[in-house]
Amino acid sequence: SFNMERQGIVYMILLALQFGLQPILVREFTSNQTFKTSVVICCEAIKFCLSFVMLWMEGSVKKTFDSWRLRDSIAMAGMPALIYSVQNVLAQVAYQNLDGLTFNIINQTKTLFAAICLYLIMGKRQSGLQCVALAALFGASVILATQDPPRGATRVNSFEYGIVPVFTASLLSGVAQALSQRSLQSARRNPYLYTMELCVFSSLALLVSLPFAAEWPAMRTLGFLHAFTPLTFIPIIINGMGGIVVGLVTKFAGGDRKGFSILAGIVLTGVFEWVGFGTPLTTQLLVVIPIVLVSSYVHIKFPYVESKQAKSS
């Protein structure tokens, strides 16, 4: 409907703003000495609490939890959370065995995989113009990736431990997005409840794997919240809000459009750096800005319309 489409656009804009601000907030308020696992678990906890507050504010707590079933929760949120966890591990493996440029370019295929998985899992088709918009989005991602120099000139790209894992991670990202969209749209799962469920399952996966993590020995010695300050929670809270908005974008706009928000957020990071810190805008960024604006407009304005023959059959 029109109202749902309008809500989706608003949430896409909010997600782009959050994604654009996040790297700057992390750089300014988070110490390099903090443990990544601690930051992620704190973010999941904040996201869970914020989602519960939103659920309470809309007056849906009793109704939602009266109909809640563990089996449904595992089926709808457990699998995407597990897939996201595996995806993150594969991405870390790939990042250690590829130069930054190769990783960034291949990683952008997740938007295309999201569109493919949405078709295979939900039967959601793309119009011809939407396919062009997705191709333009991928092209813009490649242009942006070229502004990052390779992380190591002597690093040799590994096919088995680099290219295969990052492609697999991108595919899994598309599968998880499609499963999430099916739960939120087809099964009409409340987006705040769904975010809470993802937080719980993701945190459980992290806690189970924590004793095997490289950070575990240092964490046991220095403490879970080592190098945290009150300011550290600013990017954590903002990131938690962004996690809630991701669920709303998936529900009202679709997982395939999340990629447009993320790319717009990357562009906004460059703009914020220019406005706030005087960092000059790169040529790549100036080229990508109109591509993002036009491709986003086209993808939203020209959706797939089922033909009359297909409807009658």
Image: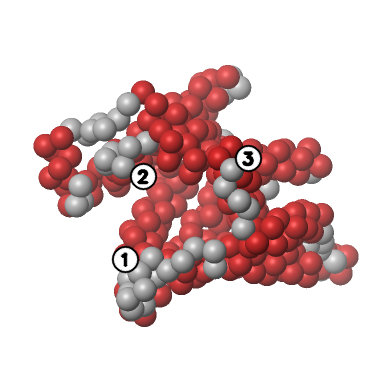
Q: Quadrant of residue 36?
A: top left
Above or below, comparing residue 134 to residue 263 in the picture: below
Q: Secondary structure at mark 3?
A: helix
Residue 263 seen by the camera: yes
Q: Residue at x 46, y 66 (%)?
A: 149
The mark that comes first in sequence, 1 or 2, is 1
What's under tag 3, amino acid-wise?
A: Val
Q: Secondary structure at mark 2?
A: helix
Residue carrying label 3: 275
Query: What distance separates the C-alpha of mark 2 from that of mark 3?
Result: 36 Å
Disc marking residue 202: 2
Q: Quadrant of residue 307?
A: bottom right
What's under tag 1, amino acid-wise?
A: Gln
The mark that comes first in sequence, 2 or 3, is 2
Q: Nearer the viewer, residue 231 or 190?
A: 231
Q: Are marks 2 and 3 in contact (CB under 8 Å)?
A: no
Which quadrant of the figure contains the C terminus? bottom right
Q: Nearer the viewer, mark 1 or mark 2?
A: 1
Specify whether 176 is left or right of 260. left
What's under tag 2, amino acid-wise?
A: Ser
Disc marking residue 96: 1
Q: Quadrant of residue 134?
A: bottom right
Q: Residue at x 78, y 54 (%)?
A: 297
Answer few, some or many: residues within 10 Å of disc 3's Cα (few below 14, many 20 plus, some between 14 and 19).
few
Q: Nearer the viewer, mark 3 or mark 1?
A: 3
